[in-house]
Image (tube, helix red, strand yellow):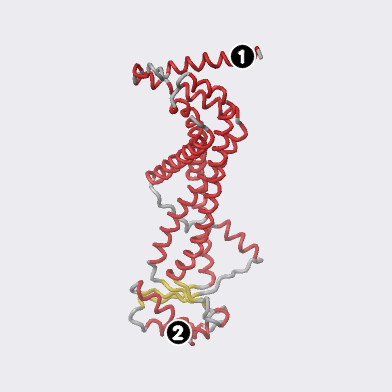
Amino acid sequence: MARTKARTERNAQQTRQAHVSAGRHGSGGKQSGGGKARRQVPDALGDAITGLKRNKALTIWSIVTIALSLFIAGVFVVADIVVADALDSVENEVTIYAYVDDNASQDDIKAYMNTLRQDDKVRDVSFTTKDEAWEDYRKSMGDELASNVQTALDGENPLPGSIVVTMNDANDVDGMAAKIAKSDKFASIADGGKTDGNVTYGKQQVSQLLSFTNTMRAVGVVFVIVLIGISSVLVSNTIRNSITVRSEEIGIMRLVGASRKYIRKPFIYEGILQSATGAVIAVVVLLIVQLVALPNVQRTISFIHVNIAVWEFALIYALLIAFGIAVGVISTDFSLRKHLTV
């Protein structure tokens, strides 16, 4: 009993001192100036850090989940910009590729190419051999990846030759592609003897890529939402535990007339510190990916082009940090409204 009483008296004394330095809440509240109000910040931050240390496990888990969720969100935002840029360039292409069988007669191929040249909407018709197709693939995908593919196929070249049709206007690509796909002459020389899947062009690839990216975007959004939800719960639980541990001190603060804002401030700082730390970790990892990993990926897979300005990356990172802090503040406020009655 004596030990508890001594601890209570000590807490009361410390609370009164902090209360006075904060601006003399209660009857002397009018004497507090801007300088005294600012002196609350170091005290509140110190209390917040102490509270986080008391709940190390929850604090670490909340920081990790916030960092992971924001990192994934950042990756998806950058990927979305890259894909959108790639889609724009592909959609504006005026080239159609019609794949022919390895055993097709060269005379039949040339005859069909001459037929295509007679169309006024066609600018040029050329032929790409199997070896040329593989060389283009190797240049676009990189030597290492192309070598691995060829090794897996026992050194065989899996790519067919193709008739390359270049149109004058991108608006005519759909119609010409449909015309080639319905042509009996092309069917006689088409890869595998069928036209289905052997006529490709930019807009068609855009449609397929959009379907894939929309699915991936939906999966990413759901995953990020789940992680943000988990982060919010962890931050909220950390604040609840801090409230429970400091319940005696909070009671003393009420007795000496501390304001609601003064009591809540350390807990708000706890939420901000957790979320801001997680956000900064996410941004640091994204910076490493941007500066180290992304250039290597571009060198390996040359058709990936990241045309994002430095200021755009900076804006993305700033928004991620702001969003992370907002998650911390909202989660903390929810926990305080639920568990702290002042």
Residues 303 and 279: in front is 279
- The kind of secondary structure element at disc 2 is helix
- The reply, left or right, for residue 5 in relation to residue 120 is right
At x 56%, y 13%, the residue is 10
Q: Earlier in the sequence, mark 2 or mark 1?
A: 1
Question: Which residue type carries mark 1?
Answer: Lys
According to the picture, the residue beneath numbered tag 1 turns out to be 5
Residue 88 in the image, given as x and y percentages of width and height? 39, 62
- The reply, left or right, for residue 261 in relation to residue 58 is left
Residues 223 and 308: in front is 223
Above/below status of 189 relative to 80: below
Mark 2 vs mark 1, foreground winner is 1
Question: Which residue type carries mark 2?
Answer: Tyr
Q: CA distance from mark 2 to mark 1?
A: 100 Å
According to the picture, the residue beneath numbered tag 2 turns out to be 112
Tell me the quarter of the picture where residue 234 sits. top right
Residue 245 in the image, given as x and y percentages of width and height? 59, 27
